[in-house]
Image (tube, rainbow, N blue to C red):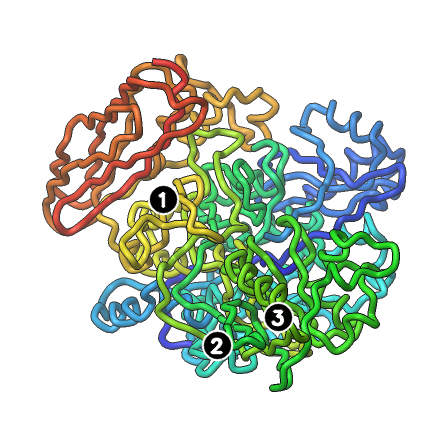
Amino acid sequence: MKIMNQLTKPTADLAVFLLIFALLNEASSTTTKHYIVYMGEHSFSDSDSVISSNHEMLASITGSIPQAEDAAIHHYSKSFRGFSAILTPEQAQKLSETESVISVFESTAVPLHTTHSWEFLGINAIQELNQSMPDEPQSDVIVGSESFNDEGLGPIPKRFKGECIIGDQFTVQNCNRKIIGARYYYEGFEAEFGPLESRNRTFIRSVRDTEGHGTHVASTIAGSLVNNASLFGIAIGTARGGSPNARLAIYKPCWFSFCNGADVLSALDDAIEDGVDVISLSLGPPPTSYFSDVISIGSFHAFKKGILVSASAGNSGTPGTACNVPPWILTVAASSTDRELNSNVLLGNSKVLKGSSINSLKMETKSYGIITASAAAAKGVPARNASLCMINTLDPNLIKGKIVVCTAGDFTDARIRKSIVIRQGGGAGMILIDPIFANDVGFQFFTPTILIGETEAEVLFEYLNTTNRNPTAKFYPTMTVLNTRPAPVMASFSSMGPNILTPEIIKPDITAPGVNILAAWSPLAVDAEGSVNYYIISGTSMSCPHISGVAAFIKSRRPAWSPSAIKSAIMTTATVMDNTWKLISKDPNGSPTTPFDYGSGHVNPLAALDPGLIYDFGPDDIIDFICTYGATAAQFRNLTTEPITCKNPPIPTYNLNYPSIGVTNMNGTVTVLRTATYWGHGSAVFTASVENPAGVEVFVKPNELMFKETGEKLSYEVEFTAYRTSNGSFVFGSIIWKNGAYKVRSPIGLNVTSI
């Protein structure tokens, strides 16, 4: 299931790293495994010295330098030191006992997690801002992905150290002043699964995209303007990225919808050294530890170098499943825009069922007979099994030439596969009863298909059960409907908090458009209709590049801002209200939401450029955070090789100067500290207002912050006093600092265990 370009004038010396990824559920059957040997930062003079030393270390367990060279897959020699190699568990254990080795862990799979969306985010207002502020500092933007036309861009920034690696169907001429870097990685994949050629699937051994996902993500971040983009006329409009003046550096570690962890870490090592400013990661494994996850480790090194890392929260859709949760990552959930793609059904009794789908497959204008899948069960198949329309469950003689009514199972049910079953059986189309995704995700099927929810299903079955003649229906083409309400709505698939590693850090951080996003598509990636240049898909993979584009735009205007300052600006200016001025709700039934769904809220790009106050923190603050987290000496070395002296007593994790405030296992009264940095013109006075979490009184001391000049820092305390417990769950509120021109909002999440 797929959960799911031309330039104007140059902006700032900014680089964004784009990683293309996916998941293949396969495992090695050999007695050896692919391990990552991590040794932290190093002081070697060059990469060759690191590689030579790595081979000597490997030779101590393999027996010789040639055997060590054969075993080694990747050498991490730039931003940090390490290597990956094919080893036995016994060899891996011996290496882990070596003094200079910090950790040894298995390389694992890293799973995958726009025309109107940028208009919905107010990007036109940003264009007007550009015209009205010609003297505002800007710089050339390089982003790590006719969306990649380099017209109007100046020379490649000299500080960029990356390369344009040639390969199949890709030469140095394919890079330009827009796509300035291109690297690809396959060694880890081939070490585990054999040569790419053995897969018996189409691939190109180069940075060329044969999946489509990477092209889609890259163009969402920094695609140039393209007029009249659409998918067969659906969602027509001007396609563009959030920062169309940015440059792209592309790093491809994924093949056949699979990303090898060691390849991903190698890409991160290169990207940091190449000189990028924003890393965009539409991928990530379930959170297990801050210290043995390639994304966590690599992104920490990026954070130390001043690089913002934006990453998708995941598509699991249930509490506690948000991934990419370290505080040094900006974690992105997915929500809708105010555009719907409606596909309706006209029943034989003239009633219309409102449905949704990206119905690019045209059905003939005539009506067709309808049959429920449960009534078309193959011999020996229970009706309940047949209703799910899976392979070998339907009788082709009964469904031929008819519209088949199927039902969707749980969240992971293979919906697109059902359309293949209908098509192979000769069916004319499918009505899919899907309470989860009916109003959420537009899938593209292999036969004309329309999704309906439970309310519409009741109307359908009433017709089927009462008609005295053969029931019929016909499908209407997909209609693009703009200015819908309410919007945004949280996507049902978007992964949720709490953060299972440190609940005090509310995750996700932010939400952005990730539902039915139209963006550039590789013509080498074939969809249900064949080769296309634009495609519509959904997922936090799509919302993440929206935030990466916003971050790139902010960095181009505020080049001196740290990653945490940009993160703070995006979070504290977000909105929690939809376009009906009600709290953002969640599909499919408008259920209530909390910061564990949307983080600080829905991104507001224009406001983020001028936030008023920012909450800044750096690597030293992260060290204090990890000290309180209870890291061992070895775990500390996974992130930094510098000598660490933890404060005694340790600083509570909730006192990390984060833009949101979380306290878990709260007992009675807790006081939290924050420091705000003023970003504005002249002096300013901010006054605090509070939304109290249920059962808790909140006091802000002082209640006013009086700033004299830009860059001034002032601290304040937030005192929480509970008068009832929260019964094992979190209660939520907020603090808003206002001064007339600005509203700086921080969500609050408290788990009150006793009073």
Q: Which residue is mark 2?
A: 479
Q: Amino acid at mark 1?
A: Ser
Q: Nearer the viewer, residue 304 or 427?
A: 427
The correct choice, above or below, for 232 with respect to 648 in the image is below
| Crowding near the residue tagged with mark 2, few <14, some 14–19, many ≥20 C-alpha atoms within 10 Å | some
Q: Which mark is residue 600?
A: 1
* Residue located farthest toward the front when viewing the structure as drawn: 468
Element class at badge 1: loop
Q: Position of residue 400 (x, y in %)?
A: 78, 75
Q: Nearer the viewer, residue 736 or 10?
A: 736
Q: Nearer the viewer, residue 312 or 86?
A: 312
Q: Determine if residue 145 is in view.
A: no
Q: Quadrant of residue 250?
A: bottom right
1 and 2 marks in contact (CB < 8 Å): no
Tell me how far mark 3 sits from mark 2, CA to CA: 29 Å
Front disc: 3 or 1: 3
Tell me how far mark 3 sits from mark 1, CA to CA: 51 Å
3 and 1 marks in contact (CB < 8 Å): no
Q: Position of residue 257 (x, y in %)?
A: 70, 58
Q: Amino acid at mark 3?
A: Thr
Left or right of 716? Residue 510 is right
Q: Which residue is mark 3?
A: 467
The correct choice, above or below, for 741 with respect to 61 in the image is below
Label 3 or label 2, whichever comes before in sequence order = 3
For the point 47% across and 22% down, the residue is 627
Q: Quadrant of the N terminus?
A: bottom right
Q: Position of residue 238 (x, y in %)?
A: 42, 78
Front disc: 1 or 2: 2
Q: Quadrant of the C terminus?
A: top left
